[in-house]
Amino acid sequence: MRAVLAARVQRVRHPGWISVQSYGKHWPCLLPQHGPGKKHERPIVLTDWQREILIAHAGSFLRGLFHSDGARFANRVRVRGKAYVYPRYMFVNESTDIMGLCQWALDLLGIPWRMNRRNSLSVARRDAVAALDRHVGPKS
């Protein structure tokens, strides 16, 4: 942060996590997605330089998305009386722009996904869950 823009960067320790804070009037110039109001009511569009970074680091981007608005859990289903349990990822977000970026990043990594509701994405195939496991890892 200091190398890019901020005059001051603070680290505040909390039990189990660290908050990194920086103040500067030009942050909105660098991160134009930030703004007043709800994120699902304003456009979330990447700049060219942000898109290049996402292409190079799609797994890290997905890690952030799934750690903030996603979950990995054991899905339980019953088919013709037989119970099955398998791991599954879900990502839920009201912003169609953010959902589109998640889909794009999954496509970049060749990870198949499905929309199970208008605001909810599912990754359930065994190979797809394993691939996403390599990028997302456990929530901290």
Image (cartoon, rainbow, N blue to C red):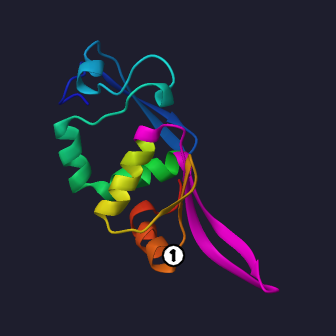
Q: Residue 51 appears in which quarter of the rendering?
A: top left
Task: Give residue 21's quadrant in the image.
Answer: top left
The residue most toward the top is 25
Residue at 45% x, 79% y is 127
Magenta stretch: give its range: 69-97
Task: Name above or below for residue 23 compared with residue 50.
Answer: above
Image mark count: 1
What residue did someone put label 1 on? 125
Residue at image x 17%, y 30%?
3
The correct choice, above or below, for 60 with respect to 31 in the image is below
Residue 115 highlighted magenta (yes or no): no
- The residue nearer to you, when weighing 84 against 96, is 96
Residue at horizontal 34%, vertical 17%?
23
Q: Quadrant of residue 8?
A: top left
Instruction: Please identify the residue farthest to the right as the structure is shown.
Output: 81
x%, y% of residue 114? Answer: 50, 62
Residue 137 position within the rendered picture, expressed as x and y whole percent measured from the top left:
47, 63
At a point 26% along the width and 31% down the height, the residue shown is: 1
- Drawn side of residue 78 relative to residue 21, left or right: right
Q: Amino acid at mark 1?
A: Arg
**At which x and y percent is residue 32?**
29, 25
Q: Residues within 10 Å of mark 1 (few under 14, many from 20)?
A: some
Residue 16, horizontal then vertical, whole percent? 55, 45
- Which of 112 and 4 lies nearest the eye of the viewer? 112
* The magenta stretch spans residue 94: yes
Magenta span: helix, strand or loop, mainly? strand
Element on which disc 1 rests: loop
Q: Nearer the viewer, residue 84 or 138?
A: 84
Tell me: 29 left or right of 115: left
